[in-house]
Amino acid sequence: MNHTTDADSASSRKSGYLLALFSSMSSAGSTVVGKWNLAFIHPLVMNGFIFSIATIILAFVTLVSGGFKAAFRQSKQGWFWLGMFTAFSWLAVWAFWAGVQKMDPSLAAFLNRIEVLVAIALGIIFLGERFNRIETFGAAVSIIGIIVMKMTLRIEYSEGFWLVLIGSILFGMTEFVSKIAVRYVNPVALTFVRNMFLAVMYWIAVLAGGVSFDGFGQVWIGVIALGLLGPILARMVYLLALKKIELSKVAIISQSQPVFVVIIALFVLGQLPSAKEILGGILLTVGCLIMILSRQLHGLRYNGAATKV
């Protein structure tokens, strides 16, 4: 009987690792598809469409799981943290895609790993945790990686670098806020209502800014694919992985995302960063891995995500 239980447990862990890896690959695919879309359309238009697609799909999930009334029947604290989650998400997603539009997607994926450092730093500030020596070393390696990336980036990437960096910081803050939000709001309702509000806010920004829809006809397939890959597929698979293995292990596997982005971007877009730019990205990723592993060894918390939208 115990042998069966152990076998089932091992099988569950194995499927958890595969799901986490698939989530990382899906997220990488969304980054490359998003870069292709942004060659033709404005980031605000793309965001409006992808969150509208996600809202429509999640509406069916919400209807089956609890209904629309339950999704909007939240406490004051629930609405507050849902609002915070939505606001940080809007800014983070906009900054990230605006940056990706101006730089190599592989470099953007590497740079976005800084959200790990931000999430751990927030845990230290608000949960009373401390940096140990290993984590300090990991943070130093990550910062060196950022410096190397910035020093070696081609001049046309400069604005994109800062936008992605700001987006990464905001993503770290978003994930921290989301962990508080789920204490008051059901995860399905939280995701559905957030996506709906994001879609409305992006369309308001599109209309208020007079943003053109030119080029949408050339990438509408890519926009639909991104709407499915990012907010739906990558996120859902990520949550399924969390049911089978620990958050810290999923976080470790999610650090493989830039590697998949490099491979996919090379074959799909024909883009490959320089050796020095990749070196900076590898240092940043290795530093993040060191911090996550240290958190795991010392039994401390790490709130990180594998997806961007």
Image: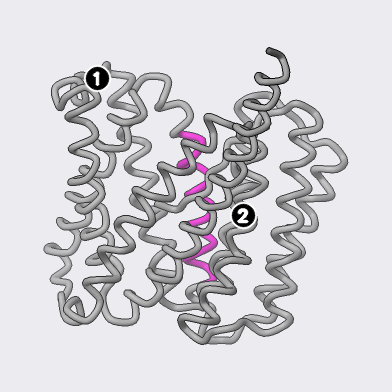
Whether residue 114 appears in magenta in the rendering, the answer is no
Q: Which residue is mark 1?
A: 74
Residue 219, position in %: x, y? Answer: 25, 76
Q: CA distance from mark 2 to mark 1?
A: 33 Å
Type of the residue with mark 1: Gln
The residue to which callout 2 is attached is 114
What is the quadrant of the N terminus in the image? top right
Q: Answer few, some or many: residues within 10 Å of disc 1's Cα (few below 14, many 20 plus, some between 14 and 19).
A: some
Count of marks, rendered view: 2
Within 10 angstroms of label 2, few (less than 14), some, or many (20 or more) residues?
Answer: many
279 in relation to 53, above or below: below
Left or right of 205 on screen, residue 264: right
Q: Main secondary structure of the magenta part?
A: helix
Q: Based on the displayed image, in which of its 4 quarters is residue 80 positioned?
A: top left
Q: Residue 47: x, y in percent?
A: 28, 60
User: In the structure shown, which secondary structural element does the residue marked by tag 1 occupy?
Assistant: loop
Instruction: Verify whether residue 175 appears in magenta.
Output: yes
Residue 221 in which image quadrant: bottom left
The magenta-colored residue range is 161-177
